[in-house]
Amino acid sequence: QVQLVESGGGLVQPGGSLRLSCAASRSIFTIYASMGWYRQAPGKQRELVAYISSGGWINYADSVKDRFTVSRDNAKNTLYLRMNSLKPEDTAVYYCHVQERNQAYWGQGTQVTVSS
């Protein structure tokens, strides 16, 4: 059973930065794997934040473009999300997702709260 463990969330002031990490318990970051970050705010549906396809194509939600950067380290089986210029509306639980061939994996989520 593969586990994805997110870390790096917390409380930050508006305009601040955080880096989220998502580590897989075994090697699933293959050339066939696509992966990314989603978030879910209270009372809202889960939404895509950023995604990297198996071919390296990257997609961002319009609301985070030019502020967030997603990256992957295949050797470490770790996915990252660098978040700059954070806004209160970025407050949510952030989840990582990995799709490796026909297997889909989700992390347990990490809370990000942006507040003064």
Image: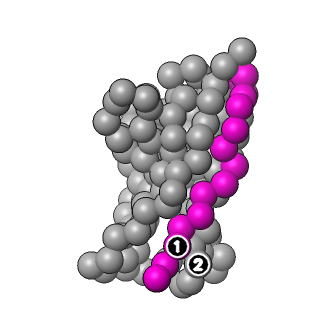
Indicate yes or no whether the magenta region holds residue 20.
no
Distance from disc 2 to disc 1, alpha carbons, whole Å, reads 5 Å
On screen, residue 44 versus residue 64, left or right, reads left
Percent from the top left, x then y, of residue 74? 58, 76
Q: 10 Å neighbourhood of mark 2: few (<14), some, or many (≥20)?
A: few
Percent from the top left, x then y, of residue 29? 50, 77
On screen, residue 69 versus residue 33, left or right, reads right
Q: Is mark 2 on a helix, strand or loop?
A: loop
* Label 2 with label 1: CB-CB less than 8 Å: yes
Residue ID for mark 1 = 3
- Residue plotted at (72% across, 22% down): 13
Which three-letter amino acid code belongs to the residue tagged 1? Gln
- Residue plotted at (54% across, 29% down): 91
Percent from the top left, x then y, of residue 23? 61, 68
Indicate yes or no whether the magenta region holds residue 4.
yes
Instruction: Look at the image and give the residue range highlighted in magenta.
Output: 1-16
Residue 33 in sight in this render: yes
- Residue plotted at (49% across, 78% down): 2
Residue ID for mark 2 = 25
Which three-letter amino acid code belongs to the residue tagged 2? Ser
Percent from the top left, x then y, of residue 94? 51, 45
